[in-house]
Image: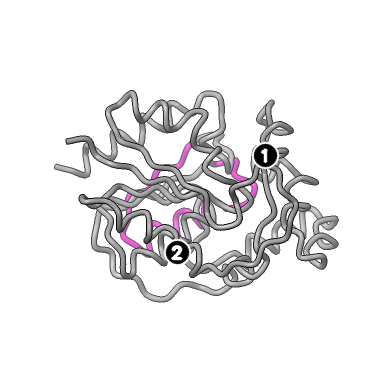
Amino acid sequence: MKETIVFVHGMCHGAWCWEEFFIPYFEQLGYHCIAFDLPGHTELGSTKAIHFSLDDYVNALADIVDRLEEDPIIIGHSMGGMILQKYLSKGRCKKAILMSSVPPLGVLLPSLRVLINHPGALKYLFQANLLGVFKRYPPLMFSSNTRSEHYANNMCSESFWAYLQLLIPIGRLEKRMPMLVMGGTEDQLISVSEFEQTAKKYGADLSLLEGGSHDLMLESDCQKYVDAIHSWIAISSK
């Protein structure tokens, strides 16, 4: 039977971010893939304000998994990684992959780094406009990706309420399944030390990807990341 992978996107993204590269690559490897839009993230490029809590997003993931007969592998990216961490306290999961994930301590330090390196982001935060930050500073997500403008135009508004909840550290989580923490060394949002701290907290395997950006799944050569995940899935099954 094919193993199922459920993909959880991050802030201002949608299912679209998995559909160009990751899903075709994983399907070629024999997986059944499910990507879904979090509440309020269905319209590409939408600037309409949305108001959802982090628990709303966790419940959306739970709704997807509850429809499955077998426990899935779940990959959570960025904010989706924190959604996955919160979901794991009560949900079903065969293996968990935290990719470019918000660390268990939350986004306070990453947010402060952004403001120090890009003071112009402050006005967008005062406006509760997270999309404005990422459209003004695309390298935060995409580093030097040559298609960053195209991807930035696909991004949509994010719930500022959910962002505020990301500032709160997550409580204790008992690891009950194999877990992989994966992050790029050139990620401009989450630092290498934060990836290391996340892996240490959960006793998870760690994969640091040289030169990788925050949006690993949108890099033109991201098949190497898919291969790394596929290899880890196989090894962790033994």
Q: Is residue 164 left or right of residue 70?
A: right
User: Dot 1: what SS?
Assistant: helix
Q: Position of residue 225 (x, y in %)?
A: 43, 32
Point out the stretch of residues depicted in magenta.
185-209
Q: Is residue 235 left or right of residue 49?
A: left
Name the residue located 58 percent from the left edge and 72 percent from the top edge: 165
Tag 1 and tag 2, C-beta contact below 8 Å: no
Q: Position of residue 119 (x, y in %)?
A: 83, 57
The quarter of the picture where the N terminus appears is top left
For the residues labelled 1 and 2, the Cα–Cα distance comes to 23 Å
Q: Is residue 156 above or below residue 52?
A: above
Q: Mark 1 — residue? A: 154
To which quarter of the image does residue 53 belong?
A: bottom right
Q: Mark 2 — residue? A: 58
| Badge 1 density bin: few <14, some 14–19, many ≥20, Cα 10 Å | some
Name the residue located 55 percent from the left edge and 41 percent from the top edge: 185
Name the residue located 68 percent from the left edge and 49 percent from the top edge: 156
The quarter of the picture where the C terminus appears is top left
To which quarter of the image does residue 67 belong?
A: bottom left
Q: Is residue 167 magenta?
A: no
Give the farthest residue toward the left.
Answer: 238
Q: Is residue 197 magenta?
A: yes
The circle drawn on residue 93 is none
Q: Position of residue 183 (x, y in %)?
A: 49, 45
Amino acid tagged 2 = Val
